Image: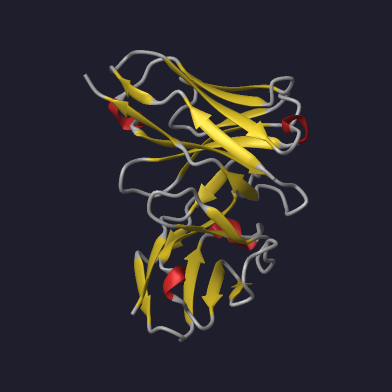
Amino acid sequence: SSELTQDPAVSVALGQAVTITCQGDSLLSRHASWSQQKPGQAPLLVIYRRDNRPPGIPDRFAGSSSGNTASLTITGAQVDDEAVYFCHSRDSSATHILFGGGTKLTVL
Amino acid sequence: QVHLVESGGGVVQPGRPLRISCAASGFSLGTYGMHWVRQPPGKGLEWVAMTSFDGNQERYADSVKGRFTISRDNSKNTLYLQVKSLSSEDTAVYYCARENLLFGSGVLDSWGPGTLVIVSS
């Protein structure tokens, strides 16, 4: 399969933890990355190569994976974390990039 | 500081060509693979095309193959996307993005703000 599947929407209470998942066959052989996109803005990389944070990304963002599923966990969610989160990875042949459909996170 | 800025979008009639550009600053374009990614209004991200750091390799999504051409002028630190003939399905915000191999193959670590292309008669 050449798709990455995400739940369309997730909500979390302020200060609580939330996990967003991404499923796809490519994740059996490729690491996932995660980007955050707020309305009207360009995506921002928050996790790369499964569980690494770029400089400047708070440590409340964490990545993990198991089998064909990658996960992004935000611990102590803040109002500023409200955004759409996309997973992405190389496809199995390493020639294309796949994006998940995005998960809209609402912080209540 | 890495900075990417797209330009060249607008309202274009179906069947017309278009070239959009991405000006890079704060780094040398010639040392990075670069990508175009698009986002139709209200929808998710779709990878469009990539070019290797030296321009010797190009890859395209099946949806644009044969109609889109990615190119780069490293001396001008500028990336391009040429479209031969636009269709309504090409209406989207087009982003350029940098691939950072230090982070891993296919990891897009910097994005421009995007340029909106609307295909309409």
User: Is A20 or A12 nearer to us in this picture?
Assistant: A12
- Seen at 63% across and 66% down, the residue is A57
Q: Residue furthest left?
A: B121
- Seen at 38% across and 16% down, the residue is B85
Percent position (x, y) of residue A46?
59, 62
How many labels, in total?
0
- Seen at 56% across and 66% down, the residue is A68
Q: Is residue A29 left or right of residue A101?
A: right
Quarter the N terminus of chain B occupies: top right
Percent position (x, y) of residue B40?
35, 40
Q: Is residue B97 above or below residue B81?
A: below
Q: Is residue A95 above or below residue B14?
A: below
- Asked where in the image residue A47 lies, by quadrant, the reply is bottom right
Percent position (x, y) of residue B93?
40, 37
Q: Is residue A45 above or below residue B6?
A: below
Is residue B74 in view?
Answer: yes
Q: Is residue B16 left or right of residue A71?
A: left
